[in-house]
């Protein structure tokens, strides 16, 4: 039986009836359910109110990618649910928000009950191994032609050229009237106080 979730504590309780008992509610044995949460980095980042920030800001502390990617870096300040909610309702802008866009989803689930996505933590290592293996095949076993080598280099050159152009175009649009209007609207959305456990109006 699903007994419900407390509005005050957000704790879920269920109960069951032993085979030797009848279905009277007096005979039920209540089981307290510990709520856990897991998923890839993108999902967990979304649940913390940091949508699309999983590659830019640490999931667990306040360091940005350029800081936590340095070998032997000093530990960052850990997030707590209270700090996430404070940041969500603050008037800070851009990088000052440390990746927090809105109030966390499911704030009653403790941060220590959010399971680390080990698979996604090693995906980068596996990808590097695959690239190394493919490169080994290309240059030592298959021995790709000079034409293909030239074309591949050209693709990389175009990518290096196009990415800065795309970033510049995005910044130019952000400075336009429409871009400024969007920035203003997003700032107003962030200022809306949280009225429920994970909802905004």
Image (cartoon, helix red, strand yellow):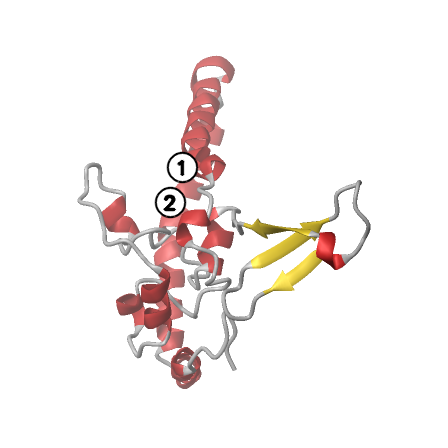
Vertical arrangement, residue 28 with respect to residue 192, above or below: above
- Residue 1, can we see it? no
Q: Which residue is mark 1?
A: 153
Q: Residue at x 74, y 58 (%)?
A: 25
Q: Is residue 144 left or right of residue 4?
A: left
Q: Residue at x 21, y 46 (%)?
A: 75
Mark 2 falls on what kind of element?
helix
- Indicate the position of residue 142 as horizontal and vertical percent values: 51, 17
- Indicate the position of residue 186 as horizontal and vertical percent values: 42, 79
Quarter of the rendering containing residue 73: top left
Quarter placement of the N terminus: bottom right
Vertical arrangement, residue 187 with respect to residue 62, above or below: below
The numbered mark at residue 92 is none
Quarter of the rendering containing residue 140: top left
Check disc 1: other Cα within 10 Å, few if <14, some if 14-19, many if 20+.
few
Check disc 2: other Cα within 10 Å, few if <14, some if 14-19, many if 20+.
few
Q: Residue at x 57, y 50 (%)?
A: 33
Q: Nearer the viewer, residue 129 or 134?
A: 129
Mark 1 falls on what kind of element?
helix
- Indicate the position of residue 81 as horizontal and vertical percent values: 37, 62
Q: Nearer the viewer, residue 191 or 17?
A: 17
For the residues labelled 2 and 1, say whether their Cβ atoms are less than 8 Å apart: yes
Q: Is residue 158 left or right of residue 6?
A: left
Q: Residue at x 40, y 69 (%)?
A: 101
Q: CA distance from mark 2 to mark 1?
A: 6 Å
Q: Which residue is mark 2?
A: 157
């Amino acid at each position: 039986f699903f007994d419900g979730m407390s509005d005050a504590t957000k704790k879920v309780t269920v109960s069951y009836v032993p085979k030797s008992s009848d279905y009277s509610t007096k005979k039920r044995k209540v089981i307290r359910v510990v709520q856990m949460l897991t998923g890839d980095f993108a999902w967990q980042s979304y649940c913390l109110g940091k949508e699309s920030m999983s590659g830019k800001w640490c999931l667990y502390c306040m360091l940005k990618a350029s800081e936590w990617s340095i070998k032997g870096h000093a530990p960052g300040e850990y997030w707590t649910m209270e700090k996430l909610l404070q940041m969500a309702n603050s008037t800070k802008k851009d990088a000052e928000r440390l990746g927090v866009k809105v109030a966390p989803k499911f704030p009653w689930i403790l941060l220590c009950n959010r399971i680390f996505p080990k698979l996604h933590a090693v995906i980068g290592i596996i990808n590097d191994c695959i690239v190394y293996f493919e490169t080994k095949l290309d240059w030592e076993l298959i021995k790709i032609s000079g034409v293909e080598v030239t074309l591949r280099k050209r693709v990389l050159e175009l990518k290096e050229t196009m990415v800065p152009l795309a970033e510049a175009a995005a910044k130019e649009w952000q400075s336009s009237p429409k871009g400024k209007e969007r920035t203003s609207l997003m700032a107003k959305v962030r200022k809306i106080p949280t009225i429920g456990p994970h909802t905004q109006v």
